[in-house]
């Protein structure tokens, strides 16, 4: 059997479940969508009556229902049939008035559809402002997909506008409790350009109740007899955006914005930065966070579109380096994603991102140039963000290099202070390298900068290209100058010990070298670079220079092909005692193992299983040597 032109059925419950689970972050957005419908209706009525102020009223029935009324444009019978017969379809009214016009927030049908996330029945009563002689219409929709539409008896007392009443689904009653409704309405609608009122009980009175269920009545705009009183209407919307309000002076504005930040973001800002992008109708402020935050901690911002809250964790508004701010903005020319919880990436958003990045960068430059207490506090707190920005901007880089703190072998200094002291900046590229050679560099008077932390090594490379700075990494030549070779006679004395140590360390791919260096208290250190004049048994220059020792030294002047070196300090008393031992004894091996593990720990490297085993072996040898063999304390040492 052939069928043409048929339409397939859509399971409304399945669509609603899809919305709740995959499109929206949760059912809480139902009230936002109803508020959007009300604001759009009022906006449309202002086309007819430019002086119309508009009002939205929200009434909770204690978890058993909710009523949202507006003084908007209303619907005629024909409009109601077009809009609501197929929930979710763009209507002619949406196309004419909503889509493409920045005054409107959304689509009417989608707004009602989202209500079914928490409701099993939705009732709409509406009277049109376009035709005051037309009767009011009543539409009742159910979550199984069927609806009823009827005209009501005409009355001149019927108010213009719409009233939406929703009855909760089982398990969703808590979304309509008065405290929840007040919280959601305040969160989403506190900055809407219309008056939003929520009915609340006076302090000390009961929560609003539903109508008498035994009578089978639906909630009405008037409270039934016997409902606890009194109730009052609380205004939850502000007439102006907090950053656009007129203030008597700058201090009052700063305090007002700080209160807004505390209420919405939970912190008192270090500073505020004005934001404005006229091309997308954006205004707002960036609040500088008072405490340090790690990179990648999330650039979450509070974004309003046409003064309706889009979300308080919106991403993609400012560049990654601007993680030191949280923004609160309102825009009329940016588009939301389908979920209306993030910003849609298009040319308008890209232009906005670029403009906001420039404004934040300008604030950073002005602040650093001022050398004010705020500048010092900002650098101290947000030096990581400043480092990140410096990698993308040469002007900021030059300013930041003057004030950013760096760890050095002589304490915390700026790069300007380092340059003033030794004429150039010498740095290590990793924290491990700094730990290995820091003590030696300090003893030799080298002011060494640790660039092993996040952003620092890249910052040094970039700074080295700037004409006013002389920056270079530490080389093996810098260290080799501080490592004095031992006398040839001393090399002969310790030849067997060094050869034995080399054999023991071969499996670790590390070559032992004996040198004299400061500080005396450092027994040994590990170097990655095996070149630069620190060969294990003397240089070729020494062999060529002294014919007397040439024959002897050539026997053990073997090339070093291992990836690392452990440099033993011959000025250290412990090392000299160890080098005096017979290399065939267990105690010599234990001493080598112990000093190697100490050097690994000093370099900041983690101990692997092999190093841990060496540490245990050396400890066992020392204990056997030092403890009585019978445990009786007679002074005999163990075997």
Image (tube, helix red, strand yellow):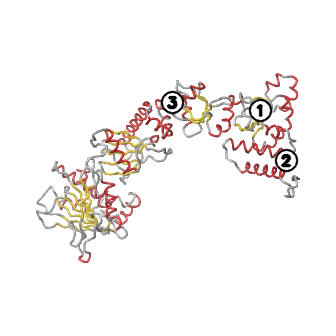
For the question of whether residue 639 can be seen, the reply is: no
Percent x, y of residue 102: 27, 46
Mark 2 vs mark 1, CA separation in Å: 24 Å
Q: Please give the label number shown on residue 73.
A: none
Total marks shown come to: 3
Give the structural element (helix, strand or loop) at label 3: helix
**Residue nearest the viewer, comparing 61 with 304:** 61
Query: Residue at position x 36%, y 45% from top?
Result: 258
Left or right of 214 on screen, residue 160: left
Looking at the image, the residue that sits furthest to the bottom is 214
The image shows residue 545, relative to residue 92, as above or below, that is: above
Tell me the crowding category of disc 1: few under 14, some 14 to 19, or many 20 or more residues within 10 angstroms, Cα based.
many
Residue 191 is situated, as x and y percent measured from the top left of the image, at: 29, 50
Badge 1 is on which residue?
515
At numbered mark 1, what does the secondary structure look like: helix, strand or loop? Answer: strand
Question: In this rendering, would 296 be left or right of 225?
Answer: right
Mark 1 or 3, nearer chain start: 3
**Residue 629, above or below 347:** below
List the residue tagged with mark 2.
586
The quarter of the displayed image where residue 174 is located: bottom left
Q: In the image, residue 413 lies at what x, y percent?
A: 56, 33
* Disc on the earlier residue, 2 or 3: 3
Q: What crowding class fits label 3: few (fewer than 14 Cα within 10 Å), some (14-19), or many (20 or more)?
A: some
Mark 2 touches mark 1? (CB < 8 Å) = no
The alpha-carbon separation of the residues under discs 2 and 3 comes to: 55 Å
> At which x and y percent is residue 221?
21, 65
Mark 2 secondary-structure assignment:
helix
Find disc 3 in the rendering and name its residue.
402
Q: Is residue 501 left or right of residue 80?
A: right
Work out which residue is located at the far front of the displayed protein and give it: 634
Q: Find residue 251 and report its image quarter.
A: top left
């Amino acid at each position: 059997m052939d069928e043409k032109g048929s339409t397939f059925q859509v399971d409304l419950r399945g669509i609603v479940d899809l919305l709740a689970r995959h499109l929206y972050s949760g059912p809480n957005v139902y009230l936002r969508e109803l508020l959007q419908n009300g604001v759009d209706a009022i906006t449309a009525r202002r086309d007819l009556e430019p002086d119309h102020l508009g009002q939205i009223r929200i009434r909770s029935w204690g978890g058993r229902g909710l009523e949202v009324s507006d003084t908007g444009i209303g619907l005629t019978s024909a409009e109601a049939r077009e809009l609501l017969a197929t929930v979710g379809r763009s209507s002619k009214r949406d196309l004419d008035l909503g889509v493409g016009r920045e005054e409107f927030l959304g689509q009417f049908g989608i707004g009602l559809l989202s209500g079914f996330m928490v409701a099993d029945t939705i009732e709409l009563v509406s009277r049109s402002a376009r035709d005051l002689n037309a009767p009011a219409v009543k539409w009742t929709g159910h979550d199984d997909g069927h609806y009823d539409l009827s005209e009501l008896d005409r009355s001149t007392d019927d108010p213009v506008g719409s009233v939406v009443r929703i009855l909760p689904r089982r398990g969703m009653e808590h979304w309509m409790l008065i405290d929840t409704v007040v919280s959601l309405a305040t969160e989403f609608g506190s900055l809407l350009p219309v008056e939003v009122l929520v009915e609340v009980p006076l302090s000390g009175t009961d929560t609003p109740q539903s109508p008498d269920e035994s009578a089978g009545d639906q909630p009405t705009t008037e409270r039934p007899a016997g409902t606890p009183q009194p109730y009052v209407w609380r205004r939850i919307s502000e007439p102006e955006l907090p950053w656009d309000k007129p203030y008597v002076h700058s201090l009052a504005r700063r305090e007002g914005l700080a209160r807004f930040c505390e209420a919405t973001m939970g912190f008192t800002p270090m500073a505020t930065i004005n934001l404005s992008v006229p091309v997308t109708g954006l205004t707002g402020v960036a609040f500088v966070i008072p405490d340090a935050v790690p990179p990648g901690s999330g650039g979450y911002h509070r974004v309003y579109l046409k003064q309706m809250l889009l979300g308080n964790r919106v991403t993609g508004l400012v560049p990654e380096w601007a993680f030191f701010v949280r923004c609160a903005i309102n825009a009329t020319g940016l588009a939301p994603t389908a979920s209306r919880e993030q910003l849609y990436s298009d040319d308008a958003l890209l232009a906005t991102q670029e403009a906001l990045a420039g404004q934040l960068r300008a604030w950073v430059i002005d602040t650093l140039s001022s050398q004010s207490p705020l500048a010092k506090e900002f650098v101290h707190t947000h030096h990581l963000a400043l480092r990140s920005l410096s990698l993308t901007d040469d002007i900021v880089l030059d300013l930041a290099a003057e004030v950013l703190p760096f760890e050095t072998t002589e304490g915390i200094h700026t790069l300007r202070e380092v340059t003033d002291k030794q004429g150039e900046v010498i740095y290590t590229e990793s924290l491990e390298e700094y730990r290995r050679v820091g003590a030696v560099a300090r003893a030799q008077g080298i002011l060494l900068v640790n660039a092993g932390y996040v952003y620092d090594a890249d910052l040094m490379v970039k700074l080295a290209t700037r004409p006013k700075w002389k920056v270079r990494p530490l080389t093996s030549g810098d260290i080799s100058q501080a490592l004095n070779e031992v006398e040839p006679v001393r090399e002969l004395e310790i030849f067997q010990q060094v050869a034995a140590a080399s054999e023991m360390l071969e499996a670790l791919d590390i070559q032992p070298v004996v040198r004299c260096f400061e500080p005396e208290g450092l027994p040994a250190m590990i170097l990655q670079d095996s070149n630069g004049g620190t060969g294990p048994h003397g240089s070729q220059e020494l062999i060529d220079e002294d014919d007397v020792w040439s024959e002897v030294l050539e026997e053990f002047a073997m090339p070093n092909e291992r990836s690392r070196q452990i440099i033993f300090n011959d000025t250290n008393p412990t090392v000299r005692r160890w080098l005096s031992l017979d290399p065939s004894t267990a105690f010599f091996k234990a001493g080598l193992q112990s000093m190697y593990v100490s050097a690994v720990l000093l370099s900041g490297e983690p101990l692997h299983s092999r190093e841990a085993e060496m540490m245990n072996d050396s400890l066992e040898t020392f204990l056997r040597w030092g403890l009585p063999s019978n445990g009786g304390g007679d002074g005999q040492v163990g075997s």
